[in-house]
Image: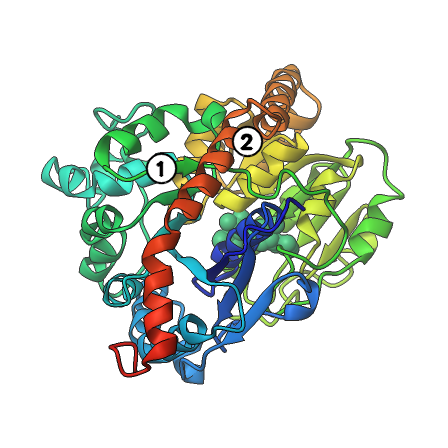
Amino acid sequence: MEHSKGRRLILFALPLQGHIVPMLELANLLHFKGFSITVVSTQFNKLNPSSYPHLTFDFIDEGLTESEASTNDLVHLISLLNEKCAQPFKECLVNLLSDVSKEPVACLITDLRFHFTQPLAKSFNLPRLLLRTGGASSLVVYIAFPHLHEKGYLPKQDSRLEEPVKGFPPLKVRDLPNIHTKDPEQYFQMVAGRLRDETEASQGLIINTFEDIEGKALIRIRDEFPVPIFGVGPFHKPFPTTTSSGPGSSVSLPQDQSCISWLNTQAPKSVIYAGFGSLAAISEEQFLELAWGLANSNQPFLWVVRPGFVQGAEWLEALPNGFLEALNGRGHIVKWAPQKAVLAHPAVGAFWTHCGWNSTLECICEGVPMICMPCSADQMMNARYISDVWKVGLQLDHGKERGGIVKTIRKLMVEKEGKEIRNNMSDLTKKADLCFKPGGSSYECLEGLVKHICSLDSIVLQTQIEAAVNPSNGLHV
Ligand code: UDP
């Protein structure tokens, strides 16, 4: 850890796995650079501080009911969180800003989707930086949503799915982000409507990416917004991969360490790791195609089937009786894996993924080629970059039925095309290794971010002194 900066940062993640992981990784990075960190957590998907003794945690009770918390409509959930966190987060912020026993607060870093924090931070004169947990290229597309609507690309029409999107090569209409929700207008407002104003009102945007994979998108974002843009990813790259806990551990499920002992018994680069993140869900019919695709590929496989992954099922009951036993140990299924450690294991030869941004970056860092099965949001775009731009994976071009799955797995694992993809991946992994070395893009950007945060001090020091001296000066709740 570098020498103390004598400053505290308040970090507030959107409480979804794919947003929590990068926020905690960023917390680790900034702690390493000498900042004290307070992470604010909701009760919904409450964080477990025991894995992060170097960070301080503060908890708010947003009061989400059980039925609200169990919705499948993410857009609705995010909107509810924005509503319900507002008052408790404000109270929490007042306490943190008035606490003179700790280092003065330099700034707040919140998820880009926590819109309510913008007027709140402004009212406290508290500098606020935004964290974009997805990639830069998909952010460019979200910024362009009004234009894409105007040109008729959005909402997507079945008749235009194969059409290239002008100005956004190599995207086709089918690759544009979408999400299943009852309220498409709310989705539009969430991802695009407030994006420009909010980003412009912030003191900077931090993105979990690096120049070698998204340099062009970073340039486009810097042209769009007059605030500093920091591409300082992959956030977890500077830290060694461990087999348990830390960012990546699920907010609700324990990591099943049997993955590692099972992988230890497999030949180098022979295993397909299949895992589809924390939210994706498929029908029972699709699940069976996936299962038979894996079984018929003749490769060993490690498969994460999260409870909830198969719609309408508890867990594996849709599998035919004796399915796993018949494979004689060639398949291993768990509910939640220590994914980074799995990807780093020498036995893993490919990752069959939903192309969530964190999974994509983790794969690039560990040099594992991918099979893409995107489900929603930015995943279709990420998949297009994986297969057509970086050329480090294959899409399931033959469809999600068992025969197509077997063909794609074999193409990647045993055929000539797979070798080229592995070489491309190994080149990209070397670039990811270099980006955090002195002179590398993320290394330099992180230095810039630290300087930027230190330069924000004076504004908040004044606010805090006022709060400490006179609690009725506007900071009262
Ligand atoms: N993850 C994990 N174990 C699992 C499945 C996922 O540790 O069995 C982690 C994975 O390493 C990644 C995060 O959960 O950091 C999932 O984020 P991603 O953006 O890939 O997908 P999302 O869950 O947001 O769809």
Which image quadrant: the C terminus?
bottom left
Name the residue: 71% across, 61% down.
255
Q: Secondary structure at mark 1?
A: strand
Q: Is residue 180 above or below residue 230?
A: below
- Look at label 1 and name its amino acid: Ile
Image quadrant assignment for residue 145 = top left
- Look at label 2 and name its amino acid: Tyr
In front here: 331 or 10?
A: 10
Residue 380 locus on image (x, y percent): 40, 40
In front here: 413 or 445?
A: 445
Residue 194 locus on image (x, y percent): 20, 54
Apparent side of residue 108 relative to residue 184 in the rendered image (left or right)? right
In front here: 72 or 458?
A: 458
Does any atom of ligand 1 lie closer than 8 Å to the CB of label 1?
Answer: no
Check if mark 2's residue and mark 1's residue have beta carbons within 8 Å: no
Residue 284 locus on image (x, y percent): 53, 60
- Determine which residue is flagged by label 2: 443
- Determine which residue is flagged by label 1: 229
Q: Earlier in the sequence, mark 2 or mark 1?
A: 1
Residue 12 — which label?
none
